[in-house]
Amino acid sequence: MKDLFSEHSALYRQARPGYSAAIIEEILKHAPARELAWECGAGSGQFTQWLAPHFQQVLAIDISASQLAQAPQLENVTCRAAPAEQSGLPAQSADLVTVAQAIHWFDFDTFYAEARRVLKPDGCLAVVGYGLIEAENPDLNRLIRQLYFETLKGCWDAERRYVDELYRTIPFPFQEQAAPALQLQYRWTGGQLLNYFNTWSGLRHYAQQGGQNPLAALAGFFAQERAAQHSVRFPVLLRIGKL
């Protein structure tokens, strides 16, 4: 698993989108027991805090100790810095295994073998993520797409394609359960949006090449746009599987 976000853990925690009650409610339909949830690639806890109220114990694992340090401290959550494919859990001990916006960085075969090992017979695996941000304002949306597809072209890691393909092309050797189409919707200021774009791994790679500020056009738009907040949405990526 790659570690692309440790250096900017605090910004990641602040600027990345959260998740929603609709997502966790859909997942819980397929996890009848609520003793232990194992979250892999937990990062700074955006999804962990949705799991914690529903399980007696949550194990949150991430390769980045600095990311985990940004996660909220919850009484029933244990955080451990380790590769996501190495849970350290006993066999058939987990009611739910989750991955949020991270599975595209995993070694699929190794991770799925570990998930199969630790899941209880009636447990489930839930893979969650979000796709490219979309703005209601057409001019803003055009600038976002220009940044993503043109300015940062060639700066994205190869694994990013799985997000672009809405996780439909990841290997998924489980009995897939039907899941509805969901969205995350927000009203964000220009400053919040610029912070979010600064968490993009593609933008980090671009900066290492020493080019001009890739966010200049967006910053200029926000400086001229009178709207204090901008309506944006993310398509939710959700795949749920049973053994």
Image (tube, rainbow, N blue to C red):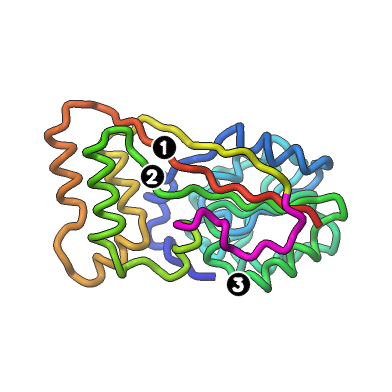
Q: Nearer the viewer, residue 88 or 119?
A: 119
Q: Position of residue 80 (x, y in %)?
A: 63, 60
What amino acid is found at the position of numbered circle 3 in the picture? Asp
In the image, what residue occupies the spot 57% across and 57% down? Answer: 168
Q: Position of residue 174 (x, y in %)?
A: 75, 59
Q: Which residue is mark 3?
A: 107
Left or right of 182? Residue 214 is left
Question: Alpha carbon of mark 2 to alpha carbon of mark 1: how far?
Answer: 6 Å
23 is higher (above) or lower (below) than 69: above
Sequence-wise, the earlier of marks 1 and 3 is 3
In the image, what residue occupies the spot 30% across and 42% down? Answer: 193
User: Callout 1: few (<14), some (14-19), or many (20+) C-alpha neighbours within 10 Å?
Assistant: some
Left or right of 31? Residue 53 is left
39 is higher (above) or lower (below) than 21: below
In the image, what residue occupies the spot 41% across and 51% down? Answer: 12
Q: Position of residue 209 (x, y in %)?
A: 22, 72
Labels 2 and 1 touching (C-beta < 8 A): yes
**Residue, far top:** 227
Q: Which residue is mark 1?
A: 233
User: Callout 3: few (<14), some (14-19), or many (20+) C-alpha neighbours within 10 Å?
Assistant: few
User: Callout 2: few (<14), some (14-19), or many (20+) C-alpha neighbours within 10 Å?
Assistant: some
State the SS at label 1.
strand
Sequence-wise, the earlier of marks 3 and 2 is 3
Marker count (numbered):
3
Main SS of residues in magenta: loop
Q: Is residue 216 visible?
A: yes
Q: Is residue 68 visible?
A: no
State the SS at label 2.
loop
Name the mark nearer the viewer: 1 or 3: 1
Q: Residue 34 sits in which quadrant? A: top right
Q: The magenta stretch spans which residues?
A: 164-176
Q: Which residue is mark 2?
A: 133
